[in-house]
C-alpha cells in the first residue's frame, strides 16, 4: 500500500461496536456476493464509461493552454454549473491557500479564481466590479453548449468584454471547454475562433472533474494535475480488486447501501479539515444525482436514493452534532480525517491561571482539531449511530485525485447495488421544460399556458 | 400588511395539489388546536426567553462602538463559532456586495469582514497572511467565555497582535462580546481592559443574531441595524397572532411538524437568491440544534428532529433536484423567492440565429432566475412532493430581520409541538468531555484512559 494511501475504516458501523443500528458480520458476509457482482458489472461497462480512463490521459494540451493563460491573466473566471463548477471549486479550496483570492500576487501560485455558479443578477453584475477585464480570462464549460445558466453567463461576460476591449480582443479572453464535435458552444467556437478544450461525450458532468473541466482551472492556478491523476490511477488500481473486502470503494458503497435499507436515508460527509469542505459539496452532487432515481433498470418505480449532506468539523459541532447524536437513527456518517496538516499553528501559554483555559496552553490548532474529530466520532458511536472514517495522510494533489476517483467508483458500484442507472438525470427535465416555457422559448407555448393556469389555482387561504 | 411583509404560501403542501404526500384540509384543521396551544405556551415563557425582546433593545452602545471601530480599522475579524459565526456571516452575505472583501475600499460601506469559524490550523495561520494587523480589530464572541474553539482563536490572534504591535496596543484591537457578569472571557476583559459588549444570559447562542453578536459586526460594515430590528418587531407582531391560520411562524412550524410525522424527515431550504444562501446555513443550526432531541419534556426517549438541509437555486438544480424530484418521498422544501433584485443584469441579443440560445435574447438574469425558481417549484409539486414558499419583496435589512425573527418563533412553536426543550443542547456534552480528555485537561484522566482503550479495540479487518 502506498504511503499516500487513504485508509478506510468501518469499525464504527459494526453492530458489536455501536449496537442495533449497526451491521453484523453476518449481514456483511451475506451481501458480499452482491458487491462482487456490482464490481464485475461496472468493469463490464468500462468501455462506455469514459471517466474511468481519465487517470491515463495525456495532459500536455491542457498544460500548454494553462501556461498560455497564466502568462496573460491575473484572474481566471470559470463559467459553469453543477459538475463544471463544483469540481473546480473543490480542487481549488483543497489545494490552495485558504484566502487565495485575497493574497498579494507574490504569495499566489497563479491567477485568482472566481466561479460564479449561479444566474443571480447581483452575483454576475457584482463580479464585474472586482475584475480587471484586460487581465481576465473566462473558461466557459458546458458539454452540450446549451446549459441555460452557463450560456447566459457566457453571453453576459462576452458582451462586457466586447464593450470594454473590442470584439477583436475576445479570442484572448475566452477558453471554451465543450464537446469536441457538436453543440451550440462548439458552433460558436468554430465561428468566432476561440481556443477550446475537449469535454468528451463519454464523460458525464458529475464525473468530469478529472478531465479538462477540473484540470484546466487547476493547472492555471498552479496545481500539479499529473499528480492528481497519479492519485486517481492508484484509486483505479485499488478499485479493480474483485474481493470487496479489499476494495475500499466497493465496501464503502455496500455499507451505505445496506444501511440505507435499514432506514439510514441520509449520509453525512463531515471533513475535519477546512480544505475538504467543498469536496463534500462535490460529493453531494455525485451521490444525489447518480442514485436519486424513480425507476430501476427493469423500469419498476422504486424512488430510491440516500440524501448526501455536507457538514464540517469542528464547525458543525456547534450546529448539527446535537441532532446527529440525539435525533432519529436516520443517518450514516463519513468522517474525513487528515493526519498531517501543512502546519500546526501553536498556541502560547496565555492563561495558565485560568482553570477553564489552561488545558490549551502549549497545544496547537492541529491537536485541537484532531482531538475534536476523534471525540465526535466516539460520541456518535457511543450514541449508537454508524460512521465510517477516511484517513488522509495529508491533503495534496495525489490524495485528492485518489479520493475523487474512489468516490466515483463507489458511486458506480452503488448504482449497481441499487440496480439503477447511475449515469443519467431524467428528473431535471421537467424543470428545464418549465423554464423554457416561462422564458418564452419557441415551441413551449402550450406548457406556458398550462403553467399560467396553474398559477391561477393558488388559493388565498393558503397564503399568509 | 406591510408592503415589506414576507408572504408565506403553502398551497403546494396541500393534498389536493400534490396528492397523497400532501396534507388534507381536515388534517390541518384537526391540528390547529395543537398549534394554538403551542403559541400560548411560547408566550407564557416570554419572560425567560430574552431573545424575544431583542427587537426593542437600545442599540446606541453597539452603534457607538461600531463607529469607533470603523474609524480605526480596515478589517474586522469575528472569532466565534456556531451562532456566533453563522449569524454574522448570513447577515453579511445577505446585505453586502457579493464580492465585498475583494472590492476596493471606496466601493465598500466599511471594513472587510472575515469569520474564520474553525480551529483548522491552516485557516487560522492563513488568515494572518492577508491581514494588516495594525488596521485590524478582532471581535471575540462567546457567552460562556470557555468555548474551546473561540478561546483557542482568541489566544492565537492575541499573541500575533502582541508580537506585532506590542501588548499595550491590544486594547485597540479587541472587542469582546460575552456574558455581562461571568465567565473566563469576562474575567480577561476586566483584567486586561478590553471594550466589551453584552451577550445576555437569557439569549441562547442560536437565538443571538439580533443582539450584539450579529448587530455589532453588521454595524461595523455599515448595515442599518435598527432597520433589521424594525423588521424583527414586525415579525414579532405577526407571531403574536393567536389564530394559527393568520400566524406565518406557527403555520410554518405546524406544517413541518405534520409532514415529519408523515415520514418527511428532511426539510430543505432552497433560496433562489445568492444573497440568502448563508441564511439557509444559519437556519440549519437553529432548526437542528433546537429540535434534535433524545427526550421529551416528560423524560420519555423520543429521538426526534427533522434534518435541515441547505440548498441553493438555481445552482443546486444541477446537483440536488434530480434526487428531490425522483428520490424517496422523504423531504419537505422551503423555497425562498425574491420579487425585486437590486438590478436585472440584462443579456444582449447575442445569438439570434442559434435556435437553442435565441430564447435568451433580450432577457435578464433576474428573469431567468425567477423562471427557474417557479419552474422547479412546479416540477417538485407535479412530482408529488410538498413545498412551501416565502416571498421576499426584496432582500434588505428590514426583510432579513423579519425573516430571522419569524424563523426563531417558528422554532419555538415547533419545540412545543414536539413537546421538547428547544433551548438546550445536551447532546454535545459527550463530545466536549472527550475533547477535554484528549487534550489532557485536568480532571479528565479516567475518560482519556477509556478512549485509549477503545482505540485499541479497532479491528484491522474493518480497515482497508
Image (tube, coloured by chain):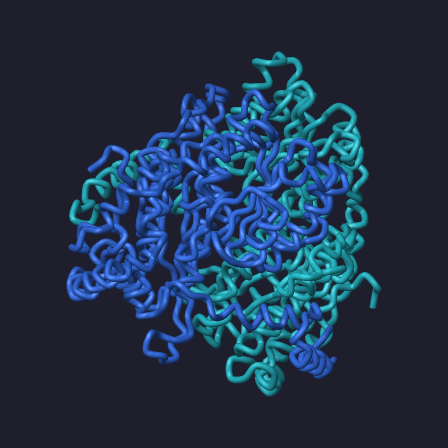
Chain colours: A blue, B cyan
Q: Is residue A134 above or below residue A39?
A: above
Residue displayed at 67% across by 26% down: B137
The answer to whether A255 is drawn above or below residue A453 in the figure is: above
Image location of residue B53, percent across then percent down: 73, 53
User: Quadrant location of residue B133?
Assistant: top right
Q: Is residue A77 above or below residue A446?
A: above
Within the image, what quadrant is residue A34 found in? bottom left
Quarter containing the N terminus of chain B:
bottom right
- Residue B61: x and y in percent read 78, 36
Coordinates of residue B15 in the picture (x, y in percent): 57, 84
**Residue A118 appears at what percent x and percent y?**
62, 53
Q: Nearer the viewer, residue B365 or A285?
A: B365
Residue A426 appears in the rendering? yes
Which image quarter: residue A195? top right
- Number of numbered discs overlaid on the protein picture: 0
Between B291 and B391, the one lying in front of the other is: B391
At x 16% / y 55%, what residue is drawn? Answer: A243
Q: Please indicate, yes or no, whether residue B205 appears anywhere in the rendered image.
A: no
Relative vertical location of residue B320 with respect to residue B200 in this rendering, above or below: below
Q: Is residue A136 or residue A264 the one in the foreground?
A: A136
Drawn side of residue B446 relative to residue A321, left or right: left
Residue at left offset 52%, top offset 31%: B151
Residue at the (54%, 22%) spot, across then down: A107
Amino acid at each position: 500500500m502506498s504511503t499516500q494511501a487513504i485508509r478506510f475504516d468501518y469499525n464504527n458501523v459494526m453492530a458489536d461496536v455501536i449496537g442495533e443500528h449497526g451491521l453484523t458480520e453476518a449481514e456483511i458476509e451475506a451481501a458480499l456476493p452482491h458487491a462482487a457482482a456490482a464490481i464485475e458489472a461496472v468493469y463490464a461497462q468500462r468501455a462506455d464509461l469514459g471517466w474511468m480512463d481519465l487517470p491515463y490521459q495525456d495532459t500536455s494540451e491542457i498544460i500548454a493552454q494553462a501556461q498560455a493563460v497564466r502568462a496573460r491573466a491575473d484572474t481566471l473566471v470559470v463559467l459553469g454549473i453543477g459538475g463544471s463548477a463544483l469540481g473546480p471549486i473543490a480542487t481549488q479550496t483543497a489545494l490552495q491557500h485558504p484566502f487565495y483570492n485575497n493574497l498579494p500576487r507574490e504569495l499566489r501560485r497563479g491567477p485568482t479564481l472566481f466561479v460564479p455558479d449561479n444566474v443571480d443578477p447581483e452575483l454576475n453584475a457584482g463580479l464585474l466590479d472586482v475584475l480587471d477585464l484586460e487581465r481576465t480570462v473566462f473558461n466557459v464549460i458546458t458539454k452540450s453548449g446549451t446549459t441555460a445558466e452557463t450560456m447566459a453567463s457566457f453571453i453576459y461576460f462576452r458582451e462586457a468584454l466586447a464593450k470594454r476591449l473590442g470584439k477583436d480582443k475576445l479570442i484572448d479572453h475566452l477558453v471554451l471547454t465543450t464537446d469536441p464535435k457538436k453543440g451550440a458552444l462548439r458552433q460558436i467556437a468554430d465561428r468566432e475562433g476561440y481556443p477550446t478544450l475537449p469535454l468528451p461525450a463519454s464523460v458525464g458532468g458529475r464525473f468530469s472533474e478529472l478531465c479538462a473541466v477540473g484540470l484546466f482551472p487547476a493547472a492555471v492556478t498552479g496545481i500539479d494535475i499529473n499528480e492528481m491523476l497519479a492519485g486517481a490511477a492508484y484509486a483505479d488500481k485499488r478499485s479493480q480488486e474483485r474481493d470487496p473486502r479489499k476494495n475500499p470503494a466497493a465496501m464503502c458503497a455496500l455499507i451505505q447501501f445496506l444501511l440505507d435499507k435499514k432506514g439510514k436515508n441520509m449520509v453525512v460527509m463531515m471533513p475535519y479539515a477546512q480544505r475538504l469542505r467543498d469536496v463534500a459539496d462535490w460529493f453531494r452532487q455525485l451521490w444525489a444525482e447518480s442514485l436519486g432515481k424513480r425507476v430501476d433498470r427493469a423500469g419498476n418505480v422504486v424512488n430510491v436514493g440516500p440524501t448526501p449532506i455536507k457538514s464540517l468539523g469542528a464547525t458543525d459541532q456547534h450546529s448539527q452534532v446535537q441532532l446527529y447524536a440525539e435525533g432519529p437513527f436516520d443517518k450514516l456518517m463519513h468522517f474525513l480525517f487528515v493526519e498531517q496538516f501543512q502546519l500546526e499553528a501553536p498556541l502560547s501559554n496565555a492563561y495558565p491561571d485560568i482553570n477553564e483555559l489552561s488545558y490549551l496552553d502549549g497545544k496547537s490548532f492541529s491537536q485541537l482539531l484532531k482531538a475534536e474529530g476523534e471525540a465526535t466520532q466516539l460520541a456518535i458511536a457511543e450514541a449508537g449511530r454508524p460512521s465510517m472514517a477516511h484517513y488522509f495522510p495529508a491533503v495534496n494533489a495525489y490524495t485528492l485525485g485518489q479520493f475523487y476517483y474512489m468516490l466515483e467508483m463507489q458511486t458506480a458500484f452503488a448504482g449497481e447495488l441499487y440496480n439503477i442507472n447511475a449515469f443519467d438525470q431524467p428528473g431535471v427535465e421537467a424543470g428545464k421544460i418549465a423554464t423554457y416555457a416561462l422564458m418564452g422559448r419557441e415551441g413551449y407555448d402550450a406548457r406556458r399556458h398550462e403553467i399560467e393556469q396553474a398559477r391561477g389555482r393558488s388559493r388565498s387561504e393558503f397564503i399568509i
